[in-house]
Image (cartoon, rainbow, N blue to C red):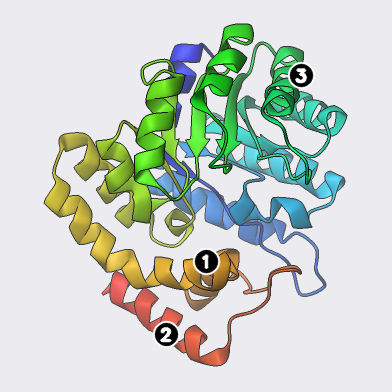
């Protein structure tokens, strides 16, 4: 797949599928397949196995490999795969090569979780991964508000396969400046904080957005991006208002229930169990009832 095709796939709804669990705590393969089929049948064409909504950091290395393999087997060429990789450099490189062997054309590099990350170290970390898989598109996942845009430009100078950015700093003004410092037209800018931030980030240069909501209501996510592409801001904000409470629950308490809310909604639809792994936890009962009512409203 050419970098041009990969760039087009990023300028879209970039779905982050959940990883459903069985009662005994393993990966629920049947539920996983059903959720993926539902996304594909709705028209979603870019998937990120092993994203944060997929509980990347709560999965074992073997489980992360299995998620990629299951996703590849189910999509069968119907979607572009942007596999999440991270941890130490050898682990990330091994995961990227495994993902390539199982259908991924791009990798998203999770923000380094090391407590001490320098600007030069950030560049070196991503460069080591990108140079190890030059045929894959590489998409850094940016959550650090202090990183200057010049660092991204430096990385891309050394690694032309760095083609896009998942920008997840909750500050539209900072995003606008960072994108222009790095090179607005040089990368595909993906609004990495999902639908709530998509309208403001699109106004500053983003052309795609990530989504956990899409697991639950793909038609709403697709309606929003079509509105944003056509410049229909009122329609985009109509969708925004419809999903507002869902996303507020995800963002509450420092995003403590970010994944939990998505799985609770899926459970209300009968698509998977609500189970999440520590350090996430289940929603309290009042919020469960509210989530079920929200989902019923969307389908009405």
Relative to 114, 174 lies left or right: left
User: What residue is shown at x 78% (from left), y 46% (from top)?
Assistant: 115
Q: Secondary structure at mark 1?
A: helix
Q: Secondary structure at mark 2?
A: helix
Residue 193's place in the image compared with 160, above or below, is below
Report the Cα–Cα distance between label 1 and label 2: 13 Å
* Of callouts 3 and 2, the N-terminal one: 3
Report the Cα–Cα distance between label 3 and label 2: 45 Å
* Of callouts 1 and 2, the N-terminal one: 1
Whole-percent x and y of residue 53? 59, 55
* Classed neighbour count for the residue bearing mark 1: other residues with Cα under 10 Å, few (<14), some (14–19), many (≥20): many
Whole-percent x and y of residue 5? 45, 17
- Residue situated furthest bottom in the rendering: 286
Tell which tag, 3 or 1, sits nearer the viewer: 3
Q: Are marks 3 and 1 in contact (CB under 8 Å)?
A: no
Q: Secondary structure at mark 3?
A: helix
Asked if one can make out residue 191 in the rendered structure from this viewpoint, the answer is yes
User: What residue is shown at x 42% (from left), y 15% (from top)?
Assistant: 186
Front-most of residues 180 and 95:
180
Residue annotated with mark 3: 128
* Classed neighbour count for the residue bearing mark 3: other residues with Cα under 10 Å, few (<14), some (14–19), many (≥20): some
Asked if one can make out residue 263 in the rendered structure from this viewpoint, the answer is no
Front-most of residues 282 and 171:
171
Residue annotated with mark 2: 290
In the rendered structure, find residue 262 and report the number of the disc placed on it: 1
Relative to 54, 294 lies left or right: left
User: Residue 66 lies in what quarter of the image?
Assistant: top right
Whole-percent x and y of residue 300? 26, 75
Whole-percent x and y of residue 245? 36, 73
Residue 20's place in the image compared with 169, above or below, is below
User: What residue is shown at x 49% (from left), y 68% (from top)?
Assistant: 250
């Amino acid at each position: 797949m050419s970098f041009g095709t990969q760039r087009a796939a990023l300028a879209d709804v970039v779905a982050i599928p959940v990883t459903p669990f069985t009662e005994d705590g393993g990966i629920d393969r049947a539920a996983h397949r059903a959720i993926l089929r539902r996304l594909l049948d709705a028209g979603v064409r870019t998937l990120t196995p092993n994203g944060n909504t997929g509980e990347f950091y709560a999965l074992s290395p073997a489980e992360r490999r299995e998620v990629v393999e299951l996703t590849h087997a189910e999509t069968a060429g119907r979607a572009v795969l942007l596999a999440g990789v991270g941890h130490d450099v050898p682990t990330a490189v091994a995961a990227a090569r495994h993902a390539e062997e199982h259908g991924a054309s791009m990798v998203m590099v999770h923000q380094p979780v090391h407590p001490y990350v320098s600007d030069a170290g950030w560049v070196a970390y991503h460069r080591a991964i990108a140079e190890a898989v030059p045929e894959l598109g590489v998409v850094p996942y940016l959550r650090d508000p202090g990183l200057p845009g010049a660092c991204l430009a430096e990385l891309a100078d050394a690694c032309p396969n760095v083609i896009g950015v998942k920008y997840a700093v909750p500050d539209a003004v900072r995003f606008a400046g960072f994108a222009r410092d790095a090179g607005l037209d040089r990368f595909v800018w993906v609004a990495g904080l999902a639908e709530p931030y998509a309208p403001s980030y699109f106004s500053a240069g983003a052309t795609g957005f990530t989504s956990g909501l899409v697991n639950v209501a793909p038609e709403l996510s697709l309606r929003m991006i079509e509105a944003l592409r056509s410049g229909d801001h009122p329609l985009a904000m109509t969708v925004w208002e419809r999903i507002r409470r869902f996303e507020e629950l995800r963002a509450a308490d420092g995003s403590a229930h970010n994944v939990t809310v998505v799985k609770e909604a899926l459970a209300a639809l009968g698509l998977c169990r609500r189970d999440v792994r520590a350090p996430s936890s289940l929603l309290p009962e009042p919020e469960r009832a509210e989530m079920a009512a929200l989902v019923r409203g969307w389908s009405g």
